[in-house]
Image (cartoon, helix red, strand yellow):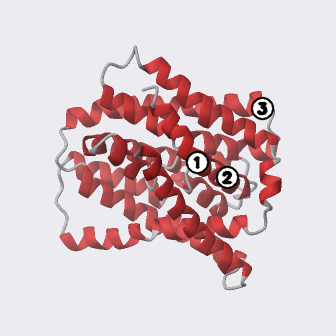
Amino acid sequence: MSSLVVLEQMVMIFILILTGFVLYKKNRISDSASKDLSALVVNVCSPGLIIVSMFNDLSQIPRENVIFVGIIGIIFYLFLIFFGYFLVWVLKMPEHLKNAYVLMTVFGNTGFIGIPVALAIIGPESMVYVIVFNFLFNLTIFTFGIMLLKKGSKGKKRSWKDYLNPGLIACIAAFFIYWFQIELPEEIETLAGYYGNACTLLSMIVIGISLAGMRLGDMMKNRKLLAFVAIRFIAFPIILALVLKPVLADLLIREVVILMAALPVGNFPAMLCEQYGKDPKPIAEGIVVTSVLSVFTITLTFMLV
């Protein structure tokens, strides 16, 4: 069952990526349009999706549950950040690839793949935990992720105002909406939903455009990429499953944490690279390779939970 669900999501991902690939090859869309679409995803669609997720999925969940899972999620993302820097050091990544590989280490596809797979192989009771992880994903990528991409940028000295972006504002707003149980007009929720629904399609089209200039053969000969994938997306989830089994007694939480660790590279880091003038191709390659392998790696990992 789990393999079938992952396969279905993977097929949909590749159809959407292929759409962008074909549009670019047929000269129906340009490189400049790719950057514009990325800006739309980062500044409009993703913030809308963040707001909607808090409306729909956390409104009836006790605060104690959210706090407990939130603490686990914070530890999870902090560990992945340190793990990302460790991997680029161990694998001796070239300087221009380090940030891309750290982003790939930290940010998995928690939404488009994570939610349906969690529903299928763990059950609907896992949704509260998955949504909390999604919220922390957004909070981390709109702070640490943007900081990482802006760090090497030339120009004026950065200030805290540079990091007060629409995504972070949406995270803060979503938290206050949930925590203080603020009821907003239904029209606002509907409007945010329209923005959010476009997020996956547009981001996958941009990734397809990025892949249009690559050769699959070169991708599969990239030894550093394959070594990275083997460590981060095969060995790490398996080791984590074995380590957590005697440590974390709650099976439901353990399954969610392990699933979050086993998910393939997410699409949003590639959007940020495009938006901030960095090369999105290394991350696009990681998305393709890890999405294909996830059919097998997620299934294998869950045999050990």
For the point 43% across and 20% down, the residue is: 244
Distance (Cα) linking label 1 and label 2: 8 Å
The reply to whether the C-beta atoms of the residues labelled 1 and 2 are less than 8 Å apart is yes
Mark 3: secondary structure: loop
Mark 1: secondary structure: loop
Residue nearer the viewer, 124 or 7? 7
Kind of residue indicated by mark 3? Leu
Residue nearer the viewer, 7 or 274? 7
| 156 up-or-down from 145: above or below | below
Q: Position of residue 205 (x, y in %)?
A: 59, 70
* Residue identifier under label 2: 283
For the point 69% across and 58% down, the residue is: 280
Q: Is residue 129 left or right of residue 270?
A: left
Kind of residue indicated by mark 1? Val
Q: Disc 1 or 2, which lies upstream in sequence?
A: 1
* Residue identifier under label 3: 91
Q: Label 2: few (<14), some or many (≥20) within 10 Å?
A: many
Q: Label 1: few (<14), some or many (≥20) within 10 Å?
A: many
* Residue identifier under label 1: 265
